[in-house]
Image (cartoon, rainbow, N blue to C red):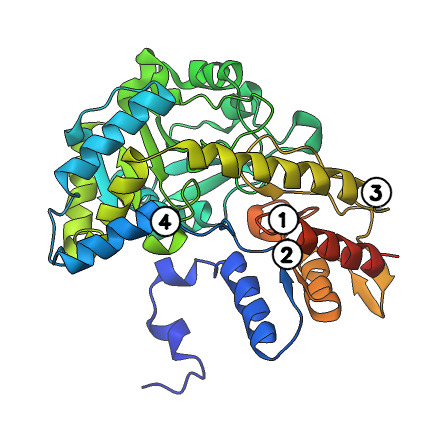
Amino acid sequence: MNGNNNPGETYLTRRVLSMQESQTMRISGLAKQMKAEGKDIISLSAGEPDFPTPGFVAEAGIEAIQSGFTRYTANAGIPELKKAVVEKFKRDNAIEFSPAQIIISAGGKQTLANAILSLCQEGDEVIIPAPFWVSFPEMVRLSGAEPVIVPTTEETGYKMTPGQLEAAITPQTKLLILNSPSNPSGVVYSENDVRALMKVIEDREIFVLSDEMYDQIVYGGVKPFSPARIPEIQDRVIVSNGVSKTYSMTGWRIGYLAGPKWLIDACAKIQSQTTSNANSIAQKAALAALTGDQSIIEERRAEFEKRRDYMYGALNDIPGISAALPEGAFYIFPSISGVLGKTFGGRTLNTSTDVAEYLLVDHFVATVPGDAFGAPLNLRLSYAASIDELKEAVGRIRKAFS
């Protein structure tokens, strides 16, 4: 070994060194550590529903264990689950796929990583509107490609415009990543929005990776629209989804990807040499989730909507904070520009990371800084918590900035 104090800088690859640690995981980890120390932490940082996995889904997992369904499955997923995914796309999204166009993976994260690693390499560019989910740029960097970030603002409803997309395209552009409903902003691209963006790339060899993980958690009659529904570009659209958010199954780790068969085959090749099949027991549970009683989705969606409405009103009552009304997911993404540069409790808050750390360490409320999402003037708060917890959290935030 050489004398370098940090061998990682000498021996690790450029790919790893160029990646950032997930800020959502870091803040969640700090919050959990403080909780373990006996601090009364209210966590609005985690991207997971607070509802339990539905009973009939958990039972299917137990039944899988008891019946001995604990061996390797087909690498790309059990046939009956792939068929259920095909039916889900037809039922909920009005998209036609065949089972050969589906792969089941260990969570939505793996489906996205597989797709990006299959399509992108050194010399390629990937367009990502900001605010973005934290892992998109890092997955792109891992593939060797370059993320091209297109900033959006509260004024444009945190949506990328066709003009912005056109301006970001170069001869190196390989992929556009769209996430609707959005984590972190809760924004939903309407059918008109999606059609206008797809018009820009219709005659270009650019692929679209559409992350639709929150497609069942939308409010006020809003309907997400998948770019895979547009015939002119359908053969260049890859759709990622999973059971994590809709069915409160984050820890079960089941995601699924749909797209052109040649691309799904490539994802299967990567998966066969990295993880092999997704968890066999979780696949049976996911099958039960997709084919069982769907009324639980509406019950939980309605509860999220009440919480959203409360958070929207309460946060906008705090001086220095302004929040747009989210149309989907279970996050609210207020602008904190009114408190940046000011001093509270002896701390000067210059960045959203400063704000998040101040709220956690001094007021025991865990949030995620907008810096992590490419939106340095914002803070992400998850309202996947009870109304009582949300009221207590907002009270603490109000006090923190008074």
Residue closest to the eye, 365 or 134:
365
The residue carrying mark 2 is 367
Q: Which of the two marks, 4 or 1, is nearer to us in this view?
A: 4
At x 72%, y 59%, the residue is 355
User: 4 left or right of 373?
Assistant: left
Q: Mark on residue 55? A: 4
Counting residues from the N terminus, which is met first, the one under dot 4 or under dot 1? 4
Q: Residues within 10 Å of mark 1 (few under 14, many from 20)?
A: many
| In the displayed structure image, the side of residue 200 where residue 303 appears, left or right | right
Q: Label 4 neighbourhood size at 10 Å, few (<14), some (14-19), many (20+)?
A: few
**Residue 121 visible to an observer of this rendering:** no
Secondary structure beneath label 1: strand
Percent coordinates x, y for residue 284 in the rendering: 22, 47
- Would you name the residue on which mark 1 appears? 380
Q: In this rendering, which labeled residue sits more in front, label 3 or label 1?
A: 3
Q: CA distance from mark 3 to mark 2?
A: 18 Å
